[in-house]
C-alpha cells in the first residue's frame, strides 16, 4: 500500500514537471514573434532618436521613447488576437509577464524622474550626465529582465541574449558613447532581441 502511494506521488510529481516544462516551451514558442516585434521597434526608435539628436544637436528627441509602448502594446495585443489557439494562463506565464511589467514600470519611472529633474534648472553638463546614466541604467535593467525571463523559462538563448544586452550594453556605454551615440546601444539591444526571436522561431518551427 505504501509503495503504491509512493509511486502515485512520484507519478504526480512527474506529471507536474512535464506540464511545467511544456508550459515553458509553449511560452517560448509563442514568444518568438514578440521578441521580433519589440526588437524591430527598439531598433527603429533608437535610430530615429539618434538621427534627430545628431542632426539637431538636441537631446529633447529622447522623449520619443515614450511613444514606443504606445505603438508596441497595441501591436502586441493585435498579434495576440490573431492566434488561433487561446493559451490558458499559468504560473510560468504570470511570472514571465510580471518580470517584463516590472521592467516597464522601473524603466518608465526612472525615465520620467530623469526628464522632470532635467527641467529643474540643471546645467547642460548635468543634463548630459543624467541622460548618459539613464541610458546605462535602462539597458542594464533591460538585460537583467531578459536574463531573469530566460532563467524562468529555462531557455539559454534568452539568457545569453539578456547578458549580451545588459553587460555588453554597459561596457559599450563606458567605452565609446558620447551624446547621440549612446542611442546606438539600444540599436544593438534591438538587433539582439530580434535575433533572439528569429532563433526561437527556428528552434520551434
Image (cartoon, rainbow, N blue to C red):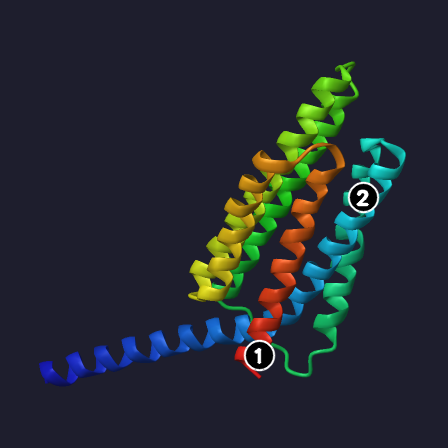
Left/right of residue 142 with respect to residue 37 in the rendered view? left
Q: Which residue is drawn at 73% across and 22% down?
A: 127
- Would you place residue 43 above or below residue 76 in this image? above
Q: Which residue matches tag 2?
A: 49
Secondary element under disc 1, as helix, strand or loop, is helix
Name the residue at 75% across, 25% down.
116
Most distant residue in the right direction: 56
**Which residue appears at 34% of the width and 74% of the height?**
17
Q: Is residue 135 above or below residue 6?
A: above
Label 1 and label 2: CA atoms lie apart by 31 Å
* Residue 11 in the image, given as x and y percentages of width and height: 26, 82
Residue 179 position within the rendered picture, expressed as x and y whole percent measured from the top left: 73, 32
> How far across and how far down the image is residue 205, in percent?
58, 84
Which is nearer the eye, 9 or 42?
A: 42
* SS class, disc 2: helix
**Residue at the location (66% across, 71% down)?**
33
Tag 1 and tag 2, C-beta contact below 8 Å: no
Q: 174 or 36, which lies in front?
A: 174
**In this rendering, is residue 174 above or below 155?**
above
Residue 62 coordinates in the image, percent (x, y): 78, 38
Rendering quarter of residue 200: bottom right
- Residue highlighted by disc 1: 202
- Image quadrant containing the N terminus: bottom left
Q: Residues within 10 Å of mark 2 (few under 14, many from 20)?
A: many
Give whichever of 194, 107 is nearer the camera.
194
Amino acid at each position: 500500500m505504501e509503495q503504491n502511494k509512493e509511486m502515485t506521488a512520484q507519478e504526480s510529481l512527474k506529471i507536474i514537471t512535464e506540464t511545467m516544462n511544456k508550459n515553458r516551451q509553449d511560452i517560448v514558442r509563442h514568444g518568438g514573434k514578440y521578441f521580433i516585434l519589440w526588437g524591430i521597434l527598439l531598433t527603429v526608435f533608437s535610430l530615429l532618436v539618434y538621427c534627430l539628436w545628431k542632426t539637431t544637436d538636441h537631446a529633447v528627441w529622447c522623449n520619443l521613447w515614450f511613444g514606443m509602448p504606445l505603438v508596441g502594446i497595441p501591436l502586441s495585443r493585435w498579434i495576440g488576437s490573431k492566434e488561433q489557439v487561446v493559451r490558458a494562463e499559468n504560473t510560468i506565464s504570470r511570472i514571465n509577464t510580471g518580470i517584463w511589467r516590472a521592467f516597464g514600470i522601473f524603466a518608465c519611472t526612472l525615465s520620467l524622474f530623469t526628464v522632470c529633474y532635467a527641467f529643474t534648472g540643471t546645467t547642460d553638463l548635468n543634463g548630459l550626465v543624467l541622460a548618459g546614466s539613464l541610458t546605462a541604467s535602462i539597458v542594464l535593467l533591460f538585460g537583467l529582465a531578459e536574463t531573469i525571463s530566460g532563467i524562468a523559462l529555462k531557455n539559454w538563448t534568452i539568457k545569453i541574449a539578456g547578458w549580451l544586452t545588459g553587460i555588453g550594453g554597459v561596457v559599450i556605454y563606458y567605452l565609446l558613447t558620447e551624446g547621440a551615440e549612446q542611442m546606438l546601444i539600444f540599436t544593438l539591444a534591438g538587433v539582439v532581441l530580434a535575433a533572439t526571436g528569429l532563433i526561437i522561431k527556428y528552434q520551434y518551427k
